[in-house]
Amino acid sequence: MLSNIAFYGALETGLIYGLVAFGIYLSFRVLDFPDLTVDGSFPLGAAVAAMLIIAGWNPWLATGAAILAGMAAGAVTALLNVKLKILNLLASILTMIALYSINLRIMGRPNVALLMEDTVLTPWYNLGLEYHQVSVLLFTFVIGVSLFLLWRFMKSEIGLAMRATGANARMARAQGIATGGMIILGVAVSNGLVGLAGALFAQSQGAADVTMGVGVIVIGLASLIGGEAVITPTSVFRALLACVVGAIIYRLAIAFALNADALGLKAQDLNLITAVLVTLAIVLPGARVSLMNKFKRRKA
Amino acid sequence: MITATDLRLTFGEGTPLENPALRGMSLTVNQGEFVTVIGSNGAGKSTFLNALAGEVLVDSGKILVDNIDVTKLPTHKRTGRVARVFQDPLAGTCEGLSIEENLALAIKRGKRRGLGTAVKKQYLERFRSSLATLGLGLENRLTDKMGLLSGGQRQAVSLLMASLTPSSILLLDEHTAALDPKTASFVLELTQNIIAEQKLTALMVTHSMKQALEVGTRTVMLHQGEVVFDIAGKDREGLEVKDLLNLFEQQRGLTIDDDSLLLS
């Protein structure tokens, strides 16, 4: 079984990756724009927040700056695609690669520790809560606010125009929607969310590292697809909820897999487990339908 | 009013697949006219419509809509003046969005979009009454996903969306061609009603010569990217398909060999 600390730890990272899943939902699902920039914008958010906190900034302002940095990175990817007509996937890979250098430049070295620095979490430690509960509560609040804002945005005129852009670009143009502008805005917001996740992750882990972005896209996708398998995304609200639930389930599943001694899995098996979980999440919903069809046919 | 002057457009210029789609096409459509456009495959009908809508930009020539030069404008900047219904019934609407969301997109065609709620309460009554005119019972299904509707129903809603906000011209690109005969005649009748009621200026591309003569107030035939003939008023009354064929032969010294034009 999971220890208390392992459980809260999984919950905490799950909540952070819920933000990543929101971003990936925006790019992959809403805009139909496979965006790998997130592998770079996650550590970018972490690096910007960490450096500004060390420079003495208010941690919330530093986190805000991380969001803007992520948005800028997303905008670059989208501009490469919209203005220079580079294939979306390739455009995002280019930005991701460039961000590796940029992140090293920002930090000046491969990793920066935030020990003894005030983070967004610090003020809450004095409230008498247990150490590991603070981050869970705070991140639940952050993700709740993000979910509400995103949901309202998707229901707005601009949000609806963005959804139409991804679903049927020709129709969107015929309705007077500047589809290029919508892609730029959407991918920017998506990476802003990922930048926020990176900033929070660095503050909860006490360090920013240039390699912390590796595989973020896979984890985000795993959360998204896993969540959709649990909560059918029939509305925007359910789709956003699925992102959070998927991310938490994913982290818990990883924690269980690593903690179950009988399985004999170790930390280095993480990426393999991720790949297996994603495959299952993709295949299982389809398998469920075909099994049900078989069952029905037999009954008929 | 639409004035297209000497439009020229060649696809794949300088390649072995070079295809001159428009070769000096000129056409003026006056306020309140309902023009049907016919022509065999490759005559430039769809390209002409795409050029008017802004989906393709012409190599040379000039397009004026209400005396405003839109030649260089992209699609989304023309939509305040140009409304459109596509041939593919699935292309004009968004299947992942609800009926009311699709209509809410259309009600803002050519206008600024903001952060306010897209589906506003004050729209709903208007949506319901417009949908009720279709007689399909859709007025009670506002929150249903568009994907649940049949092709004919979706085309009817597309038509409604195109006429929800005023425009200088309505472009119909063989919008009944992909429907079964019964649905096609329903959608065609609906088209005529909407155009008559709202006194719209419309340009309808069709593959059927019979339809081209029965519907609208004027008929234009295209061939190889140019206007071959253009008939309206008295000249057009009582004309039959075989008269059109004769007209075409006189003009071009050619006979039409496109079966689908003759049979449908």
Image (cartoon, coloured by chain):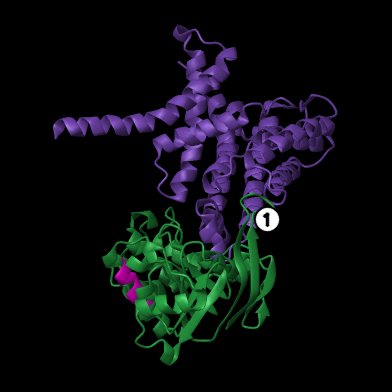
Does residue A84 appear in this view? yes
Q: Nearer the viewer, residue B141 or A140?
A: B141
Q: Position of residue A92 (x, y in %)?
A: 67, 38
Q: Position of residue B233 (x, y in %)?
A: 44, 90
Q: Taken as a whole, is the magenta stretch helix, strand or loop?
A: helix
Q: Quadrant of the N terminus of chain B?
A: bottom right
Asked whether, in this view, residue A27 is left or right of residue A96, the answer is left
Q: Position of residue A265 (x, y in %)?
A: 52, 10
Residue A136, image quadrant = top right
Residue at image location 55% in from the left, 67% down from the top = B224
Q: Quadrant of the C terminus of chain B?
A: bottom left
Residue at image location 51% in from the left, 67% down from the top = B45
Graded by Cα atoms within 10 Å as few (under 14), some (14 to 19) or many (20 or more), the crowding at tag 1 reads few
Asked whether, in this view, residue A186 is left or right of residue B173, the answer is right
Check the image and name the residue furthest to the bottom.
Answer: B234
Q: Colour of chain B?
A: green
What amino acid type is highlighted by mark number 1? Glu
Residue at image location 50% in from the left, 36% down from the top = A224
**Above or below B51: residue A35:** above
Asked whether, in this view, residue B161 is left or right of residue B182, the answer is right
Q: Colour of chain A?
A: purple
- Chain identifier of the residue bearing label 1 in the image: B
Asked whether, in this view, residue A270 is left or right of residue B236, the answer is right
Check the image and name the residue furthest to the front.
Answer: B253
Under circle 1, the secondary element is loop
Can you identify the residue that label 1 sits on? Answer: B13
Which residues, given as a range, are shown in magenta? Answer: B184-192
Q: Nearer the viewer, residue A283 or B250?
A: B250
Residue A203 part of the magenta-drawn span = no
Q: Nearer the viewer, residue A253 or A58?
A: A253
